[in-house]
Image: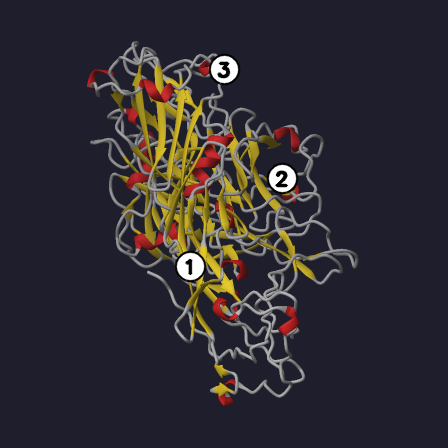
Amino acid sequence: MTKNIWTLSTVLVLLTHAGCIINNNPEEDPGTGGVHDAGAVDGGAKPVPDGGLSTDGGLSDAGTSPDDAGTTPDDAGTLPTDAGTSPDDAGTTDAGVIATLRAITLSPENVQLVAQGSTATTQAFTVTGTYSDDHTEDVTSLAKFTIDNTQLGYFNGATFSTSTSMAGRGNVRARVGELSVTTPLTVRLEQKVKDSHASSSTVPAQPETLFSGAVDTARKPSIVYPNNGVMVPPNLRPLEIHFLPGPTTNTLFELSFSNALTDVRVYLRCYLPTGFKLPSGVSRGCIYTPSEQVWNFVANSNRGGQPVKLALRATDDSGAGTVGVSDPIDLHISRDSLKGNLYYFTTSNTGVVRYEIFDDFSSPPTPLVTGANISNTAVMCVGCHSVSRDGKKMVVGANGQNDGRIALLDLTTFNPSFDKVPLAQGGTRLSSFESWNPDSSRFVGAYGDSGATRFNLMLFNGTTGAFEGEIPNTGTSTNPVTHPDWSADGKTIAFTSIGIKGTLQRSYKGSIQVVEEQPGSAWGNPVTVVSSQSGKHRYAPAIAPDNSFLVYNESSCPSGSGDVHRDCNSEADPSARLWAAKLRTSSAPVELTRANAPGIMDGTMTNLSSGYAKWHSVVARGQGGSGRLMWMTFGSTRMYGLRQPAPGLDENPRNSLLWIAAVDPDKLDQGVDPSYPAFALPMQNLTVSNHLPQWLAYDVRDACAIEGEGCGIGGGAASCCNSLSCMTESGESCTTGNSCTCGYPEPE
């Protein structure tokens, strides 16, 4: 529908004597209200959007309709200097009726454009002005055109040209002086791409013409990774797509990414990475990784929007064959990228690695700390670890259960290639599992193994590791605590209360409890969030970054085994699943069914050891710009599509890999599963076991400043911000001085 937008003031247009010349200089800004010479040489008419008054009281930009404009310079008179009365005094003049530009319209409306190939699609717009005497004129030449979503394309005058790599919706605005009008514009992206992998070099020319045959169910291919309904961040590159190609007569494939905005089709062959071994029972499989161009087509156009439907078609090269069509899957793309550092334990070097994720996920993890970095020859490995929320410190445990020695690392300066750090407090047994408070001044720990004398939650100095006190009534020698997790706001510590003691790494029949901070830095008595249950073990709580709920593990003991069995001892439990519960007494837990779900290649197997989740610290925007979205990472022994985890140890037949799942926290308030299906962490070593992920939202090193700390030039302020932005108080980029602070960049 056409939109009419009215000015709040009346614009006067004087029609002078018969000899009056009306200025029609197209280079003048229609919104300036400047003074123009009535005796100009150009006699063309000019619509007047702005009734500005000159300093001597004469009207500026005096205009009239084209029918009145046919005078010559020789006949031109001048405007009387006393003609510039205010709109309230104006009615008529001795020259006749006053005309005013009072509304504009924009056409065409609700524009739908399709961008294809490498040539932009163009659309010309027209602006029509309506005057107070009801006559209309084309005022396009006076209009300034803009589009709010600049990624969709650009204006050259009144003509819009689309991008050839981006789809989406925006609003076109035309402005004439103080008047403006808008209309929606949609760009749909349609691209046909030949796969750039060497194995697809033999794809025929114009392959899209070879899929016109009848649908044949006998030729049906199958997409086996990722799972239907998965949510991925737009910077998830590389994302692998695994499929079973169907019969050997299927030699040519079309993979489509489609929805209302996007129709991207890739033509490819079936191939696998060099040296790849298919899982048992599979004779033929394919793994495709979208190129940067293809992924940008899809991800940038659909981030935060409707899901993209992935579908696969298969045929032969003849063009006369039938066509197999897969079941489609939905792929959701989050609005904001997922960035930061992920620290996790891996058996590849029996230590902790750091995985830097910023523009994409393409850089492999690098070793951070191993037993060789501890200045004690008796330390063979480091495993359990906790990173402070400011990213500056890490506490690592030595040699696992029944040891309890820890070391503290300064991540701002630590160099894994040659630095060695001592064991804290002379190698005293201190803790097995830890978590940091918000300002990194303290961490909470737990130790209940050999030689333990304290079984409550314990507080330690964040710089020296010195013991500073206990939180009373949290544990006993019979029921010690383990797996503490300190909330982002510092007000709550969640932990596992062990029901039947083994070690803190292997225990039984746990419950999930919390303690809350009280006035005067005291802590209240424990509150049970999820109680213990016979035949179950509940353990490893992780409080969400908004401090309103937690996730935890639940494993089931084999039928008839009682409460003590290696399959329910919190160490690689096959039946481990993720659950969520609000932070309140006797909360009603909700299983994260979609995050726990097996992949197609897992078949009927549901015991996938999904556990020890940790949260990314940032609460992102939800789909469509509303709501919220969180990310959690956890270990699981499930199949990574066609990739099978390596054989495990005696407690589990498979090694664990790391997985990431999105969570919509507002759904938990409704009592429904808030999770999305998970995707595998790219670039991890698939031949080993990976555990205990810990997120940090930004990189910290080289003594750079962190969130909230000063930055800038001079005055002792750091000149770098660890992947954050150095900003002024008003949020603008800092250029000089040291009165700026590091903070998160504006959301994308």
Image quadrant where residue 225 sits: top left
Spot occupied by residue 52 in the image (x, y as percentages of width and height): 58, 77
How many numbered tags mark residues here? 3
Q: In the figure, 663 relative to 640: above or below? A: below
Q: Sequence-wise, which precedes: disc 2 or disc 1?
A: 1
Q: Position of residue 612 (x, y in %)?
A: 41, 39
What separation in Å lies between label 3 and label 1 (alpha carbons)? 49 Å
Q: Are marks 3 and 1 in contact (CB under 8 Å)?
A: no
Is residue 630 toward the left or the right of residue 585 in the image?
right
Q: Residues within 10 Å of mark 3 (few under 14, many from 20)?
A: few
Other residues around mark 1 within 10 Å, as few (<14) / some (14–19) / many (≥20): many
Q: Nearer the viewer, residue 460 or 196?
A: 196
Asked if residue 503 lies left or right of residue 280, the reply is right
Does 153 sit above or below residue 183? above
Q: Position of residue 283 (x, y in %)?
A: 32, 11
Mark 2: secondary structure: helix
What amino acid is labelled 3 in the image?
Answer: Ala
Disc 1: which residue? 106
Q: Secondary structure at mark 3?
A: helix
Tag 1 secondary structure: strand
* Residue on which disc 3 sits: 198
State the CA–CA distance, disc 2 to disc 3: 55 Å
What residue would you read off at disc 2? 427
Q: What's the colour scheme?
A: secondary structure
Who's the residue at 51% across and 68% down the image? 47
- Compared with residue 246, is residue 425 higher up or lower down, i.e. above or below? below
